[in-house]
Image (cartoon, rainbow, N blue to C red):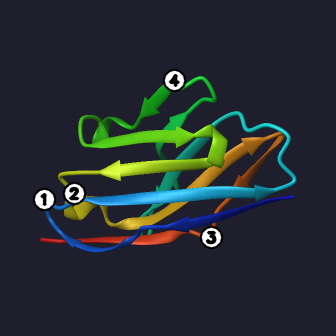
Amino acid sequence: QVQLVESGGGLVQAGGSLRLSCTASGNIFSIDAMGWYRQAPGKQRMLVASITRFGSTNYADSVKGRFTISRDNAKNTVYLQMNSLKPEDTAVYYCMVVSGRTSWGQGTQVTVSS
């Protein structure tokens, strides 16, 4: 079983920045994809960004040019640098790791005030 610990959420004004981190531990043989999803109130969970073990990235159109995903394979950690934040980025952000099966973090709240 894989455990995920997220950190870095919080309250920020529009235009500000936050950096999310997620570290995986437990029964890990190898990690394939890692990523971040978000879910705003009343909306479905959606992909924000993902990164493969080889570093290939994928972003939602709404965050391209503002968010950057990266990972440290030695630390089993994925990061999400969020710049130029907008109120519409407000959501609970969930870390996702694929290591034989898909595991999810507990979620971290990101609130962007206007």
Callout 4, which amino acid? Ser
Mark on residue 56?
A: 4
Q: Residue furthest front?
A: 74
Earlier-in-chain disc, 4 versus 3: 4
Looking at the image, residue 43 sits to the left or right of residue 29; the answer is: left
Tag 3 residue: 106
Marks 4 and 2, Cα distance to the nearest angstrom? Answer: 23 Å
Could you say where residue 13 lies in the image, as x and y percent from the top left?
16, 70
Query: For the point 54% across and 48% down, which residue is it?
Result: 78
Marks 4 and 3, Cα distance to the nearest angstrom? Answer: 25 Å
Earlier-in-chain disc, 1 versus 4: 1
CB of mark 4 within 8 Å of CB of mark 3?
no
Callout 3, which amino acid? Gln
CB of mark 1 within 8 Å of CB of mark 2?
yes
Mark on residue 15?
A: 1
Callout 2, which amino acid? Leu
Vertical placement of residue 43 versus 77, above or below: below
Looking at the image, residue 99 sits to the left or right of residue 88; the answer is: right
The image quarter containing residue 104 is bottom right
Tag 2 residue: 85
